[in-house]
Image (spheres, rainbow, N blue to C red):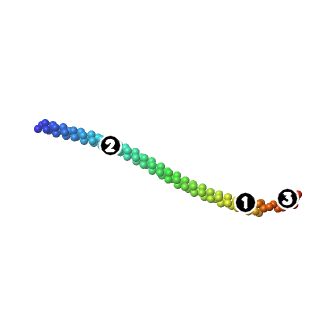
Amino acid sequence: YIQGLRKSAKRSMEELEGRQREARDLEMELRRVERQNTSLMHQHSELQRQHRELREAASRGLEELREVEMERERLTQRVAQAETEATILKVSHGVGRTHDALPVGQSG
């Protein structure tokens, strides 16, 4: 009878030690997962910050692009106006027409 109790107690002790090892392993795994989770939360926070900065930079870039396009349009209009004025001046000053014919030997 006592032999049976000793075997039973030994088995119970081995089971208990096994469960304690499992508990320690699970605790270590839990700590590892918590560290990983903390690291991922920091990475997520950093990515959100970078995303916000990129979105702001893209917004500024688009605004600058709009301003450049508007300036380019103004310059294109100024060039067209200058070309028109140059054409008007040429026509009004006779450039491009056969020169007013002066008699040979006379200068204007």
How far apart are labels 2 and 1 at the CA level?
Answer: 83 Å
Q: How many labels does the image show?
A: 3
Give the mark nearer the N terminus: 1 vs 3.
1
Q: Tell me the residue at 19%/39% (across/down).
A: 11
Residue 72 at x, y percent in the picture: 62, 57
User: Residue 86 has which mark?
Assistant: 1
Q: How crowded is mark 3: few (under 14 residues within 10 Å), some or many (20 or more)?
A: few
- Disc 1 residue type? Ala
| Label 3 vs label 2, nearer the camera | 3
Residue 39 at x, y percent in the picture: 40, 45
Task: Please state which of residues 108 and 71 is positioned toward the viewer in this rendering.
Answer: 108
- Labels 3 and 2 touching (C-beta < 8 A): no
Q: Tell me the residue at 70%/59% (across/down).
A: 83
How far apart are labels 3 and 2 at the CA level?
Answer: 104 Å
Residue located beneath label 3 in the image: 108
Give the mark nearer the N terminus: 3 vs 2.
2
How far apart are labels 1 and 3 at the CA level?
Answer: 23 Å
Residue 25 at x, y percent in the picture: 30, 41
**Drawn side of residue 44 relative to residue 25, left or right:** right
- Disc 3 residue type? Gly
| Label 2 vs label 1, nearer the camera | 1
- Labels 1 and 3 touching (C-beta < 8 A): no
